[in-house]
Image (spheres, rainbow, N blue to C red):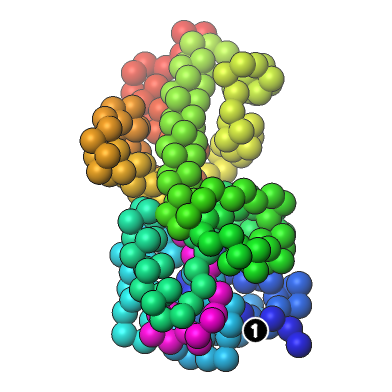
């Protein structure tokens, strides 16, 4: 019998993972709060439920992939939500990038109802989620993580165990603080190099093999050079993750001045009209500033 699975949150990442499981022989039912998204995905061959309760009926494996802590709390703790509706002994895998306290709160509620919980944020793009090429960060009881291992191996090329529930969310927040900062600095530096007279393709050719490069530079800048800012990871999600990092620092009374500055610049990019575009659209913002400042020295 195929694994009976429910996926709560069928956005870019959730639907990608649901598609990966469906292609691998899992019996998948999805739910998304957005009715238009449910309709669209149904036309693409996904079996969609009209509520979380309906999606979880008869399902012992539940995944949630949601945009922010508020959405996670509502989906897990709300009337007819995951905690109220999941069958006892179900394995519930929380894949979102949220703060560790929210993760611990929903896990505590779920555990008290007899559910097994895995804290498992992911790193990668929607395209990578569809083909099982994500990196997964897993926290929770080791026996629950072992139970989830077949799922983890389908969704990703690698996964790392970080400790108890909440620790995986911390690692993901820290990772994203670094990633968002890398893209911002690369955008600023690249725009400066072009404004100073170096051809963009030549600049990328050299920087892509030099010491200042990063994973996100070599992954995202080829698209940016083509003017393609279609979202693999939206700017507004980057801003949200940076805010999570700043808030985590405040909760620990640890200053995060760099992350705070980076977050403000992401917020500025959103205010300048780049919402919905990939984080590498930061380069477009700097290019706009370069033109306003008078152009190239070449």
Left or right: 43, with 255 as reference point: right
| Quarter holding residue 113 | bottom left
Query: What residue is rendered at 56% in x and 55% in y?
Result: 138
List the residue tagged with mark 1: 4
Query: What residue is rendered at 52% in x and 55% in y?
Result: 139
Give the percent coordinates (x, y) of residue 216. 57, 35
Give the percent coordinates (x, y) of residue 97. 44, 54
Left or right: 239, with 227 as reference point: left
Please report the bounds of the magenta region as a residue range.
Answer: 82-97
Instruction: Say whether residue 45 is magenta.
Output: no
Q: What element carries label 1?
A: strand
Q: Is the N terminus in the top left, top right, bottom left or bottom right quadrant?
A: bottom right
Query: What residue is rendered at 33% in x and 76% in y?
Result: 77
**Local crowd size for mark 1, using a 10 Å CA cut-off: few (<14), some (14–19), many (≥20):** some
Give the percent coordinates (x, y) of residue 294. 37, 16
Instruction: Say whether residue 90 is magenta.
Output: yes
């Amino acid at each position: 019998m195929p694994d009976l699975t429910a996926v709560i949150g069928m956005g870019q990442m959730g639907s990608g993972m649901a598609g990966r499981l469906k292609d691998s022989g899992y019996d998948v039912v999805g739910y998304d709060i957005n009715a238009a998204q449910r309709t669209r995905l149904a036309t693409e061959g996904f079996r969609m439920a009209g509520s979380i309760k309906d999606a979880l009926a008869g399902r012992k494996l539940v995944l949630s992939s949601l945009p922010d802590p508020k959405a996670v709390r509502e989906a897990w703790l709300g009337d007819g939500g995951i905690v109220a509706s999941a069958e006892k002994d179900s394995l519930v895998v929380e894949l979102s990038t949220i703060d560790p306290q929210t993760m611990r709160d929903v896990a505590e509620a779920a555990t008290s109802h007899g559910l097994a919980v895995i804290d498992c944020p992911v790193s990668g793009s929607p395209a990578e989620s569809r083909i099982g090429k994500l990196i997964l960060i897993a926290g929770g009881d080791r026996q629950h993580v072992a139970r989830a291992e077949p799922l983890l191996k389908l969704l990703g090329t690698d996964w790392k165990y970080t400790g108890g529930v909440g620790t995986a969310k911390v690692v993901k927040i820290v990772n994203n603080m670094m990633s968002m900062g890398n893209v911002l600095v690369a955008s600023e530096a690249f725009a400066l190099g072009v404004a100073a007279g170096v051809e963009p393709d030549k600049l990328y050719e050299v920087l892509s093999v030099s010491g200042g490069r990063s994973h996100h530079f070599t992954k995202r800048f080829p698209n940016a050079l083509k003017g393609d800012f279609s979202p693999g990871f939206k700017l507004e999600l980057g801003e949200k993750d940076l805010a999570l990092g700043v808030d985590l620092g405040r909760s620990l009374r640890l200053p995060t001045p760099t992350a705070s500055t980076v977050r403000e610049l992401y917020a500025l990019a959103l205010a300048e009209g780049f919402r919905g575009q990939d984080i590498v659209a930061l380069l477009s913002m700097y290019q706009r500033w370069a033109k306003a400042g008078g152009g190239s020295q070449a």
